[in-house]
Amino acid sequence: MALLDIVKNPAKVLETKAAPVTKFDAELAKLLDDMYDTMLEHDGVGIAAPQVNKSIQAAVVEMGEERAILEIINPTILATDGSAIEIEGCLSFPELYGDVERPDYVHIKAQDRNGEWYEVEAAGFDARVIQHEIDHLFGVLFDKKIMRVYTLEELEEMAEAEEEQE
């Protein structure tokens, strides 16, 4: 396990469309494993290769209640539906959180670490994470999509209020 340095905004690699992955080899597998470990170390739920200074179309996300690992390589969004506004954060933007509107459902086609194509559908939080990471692969950053910024204090107050309701 190797922890990778997370690129912080501003950085050219974050704003540039990443190159498609063409080599599905041990080097790619190690990168994906290291990205996953780095994501967990930083309490993330998704991470894209540009965030670790690799300009390739590869991302790792955790999905579902069981937090299954989904590796997303060379993705294409096939369909979206609905709309939801939720708070997002990003490992490359420490302490920046805000409301972002995204489709509430996504259907994608992508490759796994072996180059095999697959399709997956996701809704709610999982759809949001997948779209956020795919945006990274195309140089689209969430700070440009934020409708309202929240301070850390506001987030803590909202979390406390939510706990009181439970």
Image (tube, rainbow, N blue to C red):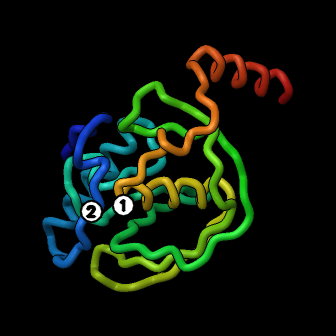
On the image, numbered disc 1 is attached to which residue? 138
Q: Residue at x 59, y 55 (%)?
A: 128
**Residue 65 appears in the rendering:** no
From the top left corner, tell me how far across and down residue 150 is, in percent. 61, 25
From the top left corner, tell me how far across and down residue 92 is, in percent. 36, 37
Classify residue 81 as left or right of residue 120.
right
Q: Is residue 129 above or below residue 86?
A: below
Q: Under tag 1, what secondary structure?
A: loop
Q: Residue furthest top?
A: 153
Q: Is residue 56 above or below residue 160?
A: below
From the top left corner, tell me how far across and down residue 44 is, in percent. 44, 42
- Is the C-beta separation of discs 1 and 2 under 8 Å? yes
Q: Which mark is residue 40?
A: none
Q: Residue at x 46, y 25 (%)?
A: 95
Specify the quadrant of the image occupied by residue 6.
top left
Q: Residue at x 45, y 76 (%)?
A: 76
Specify the quadrant of the image occupied by residue 135.
bottom left
Q: Residue at x 45, y 65 (%)?
A: 70
Classify residue 82 as left or right of residue 151.
right
Amino acid at the residue labelled 1:
Phe
Amino acid at the residue labelled 2:
Ala
Classify residue 121 as left or right of residue 55.
right
On the image, numbered disc 2 is attached to which residue? 18
